[in-house]
Image: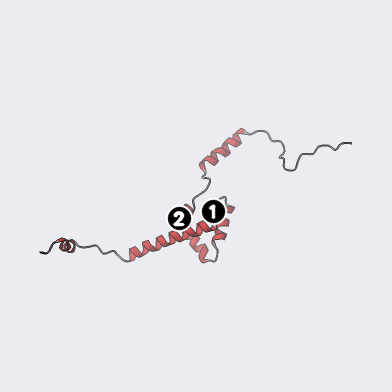
Amino acid sequence: MTKPKTPKANQPPFQKPDHEAASAALKLMAETPRNIPPEELVQKDYDVLSKCLRRGYNYTNIANTYGDNGIKVTAAKLKLEFEKQRDQKQQEQEQQETPSEVPTSSSAASKLVKRS
């Protein structure tokens, strides 16, 4: 007495080859970047990331949300890029608030004149 062979659990049932579906999937894959750099993510989503952080979410929560949507990024990379862009924005804002001193032509010329 031999047992009838049953398909293995990890084997998919037989499928008819579908070249059109595979080709469409490859076209979509070619148009979609495999990974989005953390710098680009933070730059695009800076305002909403800032709001999430103010509401008590942490970088791990944010990284998991990106991951759930197919974007691979670590919490550490998000934090690093967010802090870089935050510092950059603060410096830009400070520069706008305090205009830099531009020497006038008469004061610059007087410094260049040699005294004998």
Is 63 situated left or right of 95 in this image?
A: right
- Occupied quadrant, residue 6: top right
* First in sequence: mark 1 vs mark 2: 2
Q: Position of residue 26 (x, y in %)?
A: 56, 38
The quadrant in which the N terminus is found is top right
Q: Position of residue 110 (x, y in %)?
A: 15, 63
Q: Which residue is mark 2?
A: 43
* Residue at the spot 54% in from the left edge and 66% down from the top edge: 56
* Residue at the spot 22% in from the left edge and 63% down from the top edge: 103
What's the amino acid at mark 1?
Val
Q: Position of residue 96 (x, y in %)?
A: 33, 63
Q: Which residue is mark 1?
A: 73
The quadrant in which the C terminus is found is bottom left
What's the amino acid at mark 2?
Gln
- Contact between labelled residues 2 and 1, with CB atoms less than 8 Å apart: no
- In the orientation shown, which residue stands out farthest toward the front? 116
Is 19 situated left or right of 48 in this image?
A: right
Q: Position of residue 39 (x, y in %)?
A: 46, 53
- Occupied quadrant, residue 59: bottom right
Along the viewing direction, whichever of 30 and 114 lies nearer the viewer:
114
Along the viewing direction, whichever of 37 and 45 lies nearer the viewer:
37
The residue carrying pointer 2 sits among few (fewer than 14), some (14 to 19) or many (20 or more) residues within 10 Å by Cα, namely some
Colour basis = secondary structure
Along the viewing direction, whichever of 32 and 104 lies nearer the viewer:
104
* Residue at the spot 51% in from the left edge and 64% down from the top edge: 53
Along the viewing direction, whichever of 110 and 59 lies nearer the viewer:
110
* Residue at the spot 49% in from the left edge and 51% down from the top edge: 37
- In the orientation shown, which residue stands out farthest toward the right? 1
Q: Assign a secondary structure to mark 2.
A: helix
Q: Looking at the picture, does residue 36 appear above or below residue 58?
A: above
